[in-house]
Structure formats: structure tokens, C-alpha cells
Image (cartoon, grey):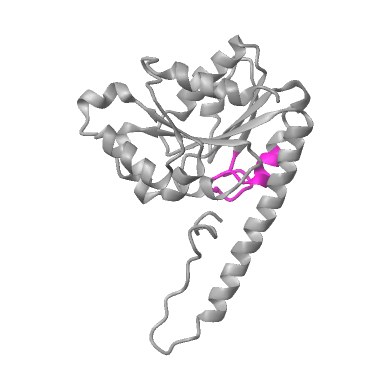
Amino acid sequence: MGRFHRHDEGHEHPHHEHGDHSGYETGRERIQVLEDIFHENDHRAEHNREAFEAHGVRAINLMSAPGSGKTSLLKLTLEHLQSEGIRAGVVEGDIETSIDADRLKDLGAQIALLNTGDGFGGECHLDAPMVARALEQLDLSTLDVVLIENVGNLVCPAEFEVGEHAKAMVYSVTEGEDKPLKYPVMFRSVEAVVVNKIDLLPYLRFDLELFRKNLRQVNPEAKIFELSTFTGEGVADWLKWVTQHSRRT
């Protein structure tokens, strides 16, 4: 799962030589299997959303490539939510280890760890059934918001709904300006893009204006937050956005 584009990007089709029709049936079967997988996932995602809403909980799916600073941002976010009296839960997704989950301890949040290498085949994303299992570890009746830290990957996580109310992604300036064009599904799927590590801009050949232009080409509406989790510059605007999306409605 996750290695093929969803219907909004078009299905992958098998290659055939002229006059060779032997692979068409296999291709149709593959497409049907993928459609069944996504249909079942979306059905489970709706159940997750119903569970959130039954308890008045908001859910935010936070995605990124590995090393963008997602966990560092989440740590600052949890500290802020705790100071605001907003009760948070975290679904912490990673292929292996509890390293990121351990960094988030003692910040007032309930934490459910999901290792996709443990019984899930080492998947490069979280899907709705995985999140459903993680929610069994959280007491939703005592929470206001659940922050889902997805597995670090710029492709697969964007293809799977998990029942969230909003999607955001963290992007590091060390990743270059071209990624919105190379990974449009991810950038198109989110309501907010956090551009992290701006403290490194003096040392990089990163064209921030070109990045903004590329992002706007695939997602004209996304909110952009330019910040540094290291220095704290620009973090306040992100925290305000998260707070607004964490309040019970």
C-alpha cells in the first residue's frame, strides 16, 4: 500500500509492447485491489472521525519527510497547549523505536505509539485502521485534540485519510525549493505548510520566494508558517493556528 497514486493522480498502468495484451487483465486486477484498499481505508477513517466528533475532539494529521523537525515542532506545540489548558493526545507513528514518543513524555499529553514495523509490515505511512488501533490507547473523553505524527515520508501519508479534521506538514529549508512540484500530492493535501529551520537560510542556497511560488502552483490556499524550532522565531503564529484548530466547536 502507499506505493501507487490515488485516483486524484491517476492509477499506474502496466507497460506493454505493441500488440501485447497479456498484462491488461493483471493491470485491471491491480487497480481493483488498490481501489478496494482505499475504499476500506476511507470507510475506517470515517469511523475514526465519528469517534472524534462523538467526544468533541479535533484531530490534526502532521506529516513531513524524515528530519524536517516534526517532533521538535510537536514538542513546542504540546508545551503551548498544556499552558493553554487544552488537553492533547498524540498518535506517534514510526517504523521502529520509541525515540520520538519518548521525547514527548512529561508534556501533559496522552501518547499512543504506533510502530509500523511491528505487525504492520513496516509501512511508510499511517492508515485509518492503524490509527483506530492507536485510539484504543487514548481516553478521548478527556481530550480536546489529537495530534497524529505520521511516519516521515513525502509520498504515502498523503494518500491515506485517517479521520483527521485538518492536515499540516513540516518542511525543512534543507530539502530544496522543488519538492512541491516533485511531490504535489502531499503539498496539495494540506491546509498548512510549516517551513522549518529558517535559521539556516544564511548558510544555504535556498530561494524562499521560489519555494513559495512552487507551493502556490500546486496549493494556492495553504497557510504558510516560516519558523525555526531551534530559535523560536515565527513559532507563535503556528501555535495560534493549532490552538484555533484544537478548540472544541
Q: Quadrant of residue 87?
A: top right
Residue drawn at point x = 79 percent, y = 33 percent: 54
Magenta span covers which residues? 115-133
Residue drawn at point x = 58 percent, y = 20 percent: 243
Taking the image as shown, residue 20 lies to the left or right of residue 157, namely left
Residue drawn at point x = 46 percent, y = 16 percent: 236
Question: Which quadrant is the C terminus positioned in?
Answer: top right
Taking the image as shown, residue 7 lies to the left or right of residue 64, namely right
Task: Find residue 85 and report its horizontal and vertical position in percent.
Answer: 65, 12
Residue 127's place in the image compared with 54, above or below, is: below
Foreground pick, 119 / 224: 224
What secondary structure do most residues of the magenta stretch adopt?
Answer: loop
Q: Is residue 103 visible?
A: no
Foreground pick, 225 / 202: 225
Q: Quadrant of residue 234?
A: top left
Task: Find residue 91 and report its horizontal and vertical position in percent.
Answer: 62, 32
Residue 80's place in the image compared with 120, above or below, is: above
Task: Find residue 29 and report its horizontal and vertical position in percent.
Answer: 60, 73
Taking the image as shown, residue 173 lies to the left or right of residue 38, namely left
Residue drawn at point x = 56 percent, y = 56 percent: 1
Give yes or no for residue 215 being in the magenta stretch. Answer: no
Task: Find residue 68 and report its horizontal and vertical position in percent.
Answer: 40, 32
**Count of numbered tags:** 0
